[in-house]
Image (cartoon, grey):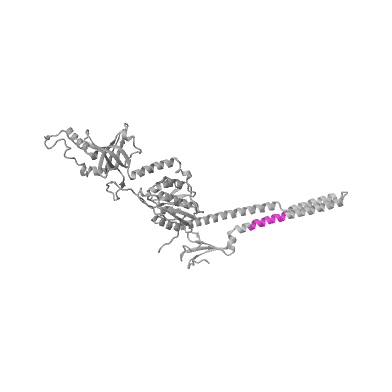
Amino acid sequence: MTESYQADLFGELSGGTSSGKTAVTVTRSKSKRKPVKKIVSEKPTLLTAEKIVDEPPHDMAPKEEAPAYGAHSKVPEVFTVGSVVRYLRAIVAGDRVLRDIKVEGEISNFRRYPSGHCYFDLKEEKDILPGVMFVRAAKGLDFKPEDGMQVVARGKIDLYPPQGKYQLIVEEMTPAGWGKLLQAFILLKEKLEKEGLFAPERKRQLPGFIKKAGVVTSAGGAAVRDIIRTAYQHNPALKLIISPSPVQGEGAPESLINALKLLWELPGLNVIIIGRGGGSFEDLNAFNDERLARAIAASPVPVISAVGHEVDFTISDFVADIRAATPTAAARLLGPSMSEMLRGLGETTDRLDSALGRRLAEWRTLIAHLNERLSVSDPGRRLKEGNQRLKELILRLQSARFLDRASQDLDMLALDLYKTMWKKLNDEKLKVKHLDEKLGALSPVSILKRGYSITRILPAGTVLTSTEGLHAGEKVEVRLFKGRFTGVIENINTEAS
C-alpha cells in the first residue's frame, strides 16, 4: 500500500554550484576520497608522514656525492656511534627536499613545556614522525594544537644526535582539512555563546497545536520525504510548506538564509524546521555558517534544527529554539500521534466528569442553604406578627380622639406591609426556581432523561465517542436515565448517522 502526502513547494529550487581552481599538488592518503586539490608553490612538496617513513621518493635518495667516504677513500672497518650519527645527519641535511618540506598528519602526544617549546608526534595509522616546534615558531600559532587534530607542518628533517633519532623541526603549522573546519567551528561557537545566542532564556516553546509549519531543506533529499511522511502521520490537519535550498556546497548558506526568510513572509506560520540528512563534518558545514546562525536567531517564529544524526552537532543546533536529533525526530514535534490524542481525550473526559460532579454537589449545598435561610425568614410568619401588632394598635387607637383618621392610616400601613411581604416572597420563589433550572441544565441526568446514553468499553471503562478501534465481541456498558446494562458488540457501522 502506497502512502501519499501533500506538501506545498515554496520558492524555486536552485542547484548549488561549486567552482574550483586548478590543482598543482595532490595529498596522498589511504582514504577513499578523491585527492584534495590545492594551489601551492611548486616548492616545497606536500607529503604525508607515511610518504616520508615508508616510501621516500626517488629524488629524496642520497646521491653518490653525499657520503663523506668516496669510492677511493678508505672506509673504517668499525665506525664509532658519533661518526655514524654525524654521517647520517650530513646526508639528511644535504637533501634539498628534506630542508623545506610540508608534512600532513595527526597530532599525538602533544606537550608544551614552560620554556615555550612544543614536542609532539605526527602519525598516520602505524607510522610516526617525531616533531618539535621551538618557542620562536610556536609564538606564531593562531590556534591551539591538540591531540587528534589533523595538521600540515612545514619545516625541515633533522637528526638529533643525543638520541640518534630523526625529527621534524617545525617552523609553521596550520589545521588541515577537517581540522581547519573544526577550529573555525570552535571559534564561532565560543563567539556566539559569549553574545548570548545560545542562552536558554531566549529559546521559545512550540505552540500547543501546530496548524502551519515550514521546512527548509533540499527538495530532492530523503530528509524532506521523511519529514512529510512523519509529520502527516502525527498531525493529519497540518499544512506543510517546503522552502527548498541546497544544503551543502558553495553558496549553500546563503541559499538556506533566503529560503528561511521566504517562510517569514507567510501569515499564520507556527514553526520552521531547518535541516538535512546525515553526512560528514564537511558535508554539514553549511549549517556552521555565522550568517545562517544569526538568521535563525532573528526568526520571528520558533525554529527546530535537525541536521544529520544524533551524534552530529552544528552551530544551527545551538542557536535554534529546539534541536532535534534527526529530521524524522523534528517532524514528530509537529503534533502528537493519534493514540496520544485519544488517550488525552479520555483523560479530559474523566476530568470533566469529576469536575461536573463536584459542581453539582456545590449547587445542592447552596440550594439547601437558601432553603434554610428562607424558612428562617418565612414571609407568612412575619405577616401574622404584623397583623397581631396591627390589631393591638387598632385597640389602642379606638379610644383615641382621631380614631377614624388613625384607622385610615393603619389601613394604608397594613396594605403596604402586605404588598411588601408578598413581593419579598415572590422574589425568593423566583430565585429558588432560577437556581433549580441552572442545576437541571448542568446535570448529566437531564441529558440522559432526554433519551441519550453513555457507553463505555469494558473492562477499561473508556467512554466511546466513535466506532474507531472497536471490534465485534467486545463488552460494553450502557448507562441510561434509569439504570444501566451491559452488552456485546455484534455489528459495527463506521458511517456517520
Q: Position of residue 273 (x, y in %)?
A: 44, 52
- Residue at 64% across, 58% down: 437
Specify whether residue 91 is in view.
yes
Q: Position of residue 46 (x, y in %)?
A: 27, 43
- From the image, give the main secondary structure of the stretch colored magenta: helix
Q: Nearer the viewer, residue 486 or 31?
A: 31
Q: Residue furthest top?
A: 115
Q: Position of residue 194 (x, y in %)?
A: 44, 40
Q: Nearer the viewer, residue 34 or 272?
A: 34
Specify whether residue 305 is in view.
no
Image position of 444 with respect to 61: above or below: below
Occupied quadrant, residue 5 = bottom left
Q: Is residue 427 within the magenta segment?
A: yes
In the image: residue 54, left or right of residue 443: left
- Residue at 45% across, 45% down: 294
In the image: residue 397, left or right of residue 282: right
Image position of 21 with respect to 228: above or below: above
Q: Is residue 205 within the magenta segment?
A: no
Residue span colored magenta: 424-437
Occupied quadrant, residue 359 = bottom right
Quadrant where the image shows the N terminus? bottom left
Q: Position of residue 23 (x, y in %)?
A: 30, 47
